[in-house]
Amino acid sequence: MENYTELLRAHHLKATPQRIEIANALMLNGHLTIEKLYDILLKKFNSISLATIYKNINIMIENAFIQEVKLPNAKSVYELTKEAHSHLVCEKCGEVEDIHLDLSPIHEFDLSHTNFKVNKVDMVLSGLCKNCQ
């Protein structure tokens, strides 16, 4: 198990038992929905509420400790923040996998004809995983 206490503090977050367990669950399981996180945490904290998990997730996102991955036609999943990457999602089983693509050219598009400033580029590629093909 990582030292989540120090990692949380480095992101200006109090290292509560619930936050430490959220970090551990995301490290061990990768991309998780709120509901799956709830199922995992309920085994350790039998009185934890879904509202507590939502509150902690939102605070952890605000402090860039975790990030939300918005998937097409599915619930968002969450992961520990790491280097920039994109995602592959299986349309059949829902498996989500990281993929490293160079998206820096997108930031170089000439958007001067618009009144829009791009801050972040996320990409989700949909298809079928090896097991579902």
Image: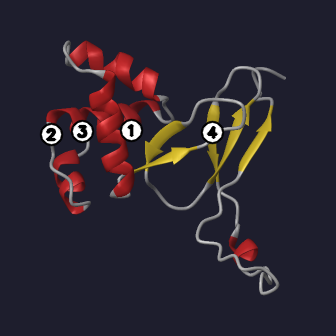
Q: Of helix, strand and loop, which one carries label 4?
A: strand
What type is the residue that disc 1 sits on? Met
Q: Which residue is mark 1?
A: 27
The image shows residue 84, relative to residue 33, as above or below, that is: below
Numbered marks: total: 4
* Location of the C terminus (image quadrant): top right
Front disc: 1 or 3: 3
Determine the CA span between mark 4 and mark 2: 29 Å
Of all residues, the one furthest to the front in this rendering is 115
Residue 113 at what x, y percent from top left?
A: 82, 84
Amino acid type at image mark 3: Arg
91 sits to left or right of 19? right
Q: Residue at position x 63%, y 35% from top?
A: 96
SS at mark 1 in the image: helix
What residue sits right under mark 2 in the picture?
A: 16
In the figure, is residue 127 to the left or right of 36? Answer: right
Amino acid identity at mark 4: Glu
* Secondary element at image label 3: helix
Query: At 79% from the left edge and 20% from the top edge, which residue is drawn?
Result: 132
Q: Which of these two is toward me, 128 or 39? A: 39
**Residue placed under numbered mark 4 in the picture:** 97
- Of labels 4 and 3, earlier in sequence is 3
Q: Position of residue 114 (x, y in %)?
A: 78, 80
- Which of pointers 2 and 1 indicates the residue nearer the eye? 2
Q: CA distance from mark 2 to mark 1?
A: 17 Å
Q: Which residue is mark 3?
A: 19
Label 3 Cα crowd, 10 Å radius (few <14 / some 14-19 / many 20+): many
Give the CA separation, mark 1 to mark 3: 12 Å
Tags 2 and 1 touching, CB below 8 Å: no
Look at the image and tell me whether residue 23 can be seen: no
For the residues bearing labels 2 and 3, Cβ distance under 8 angstroms? yes
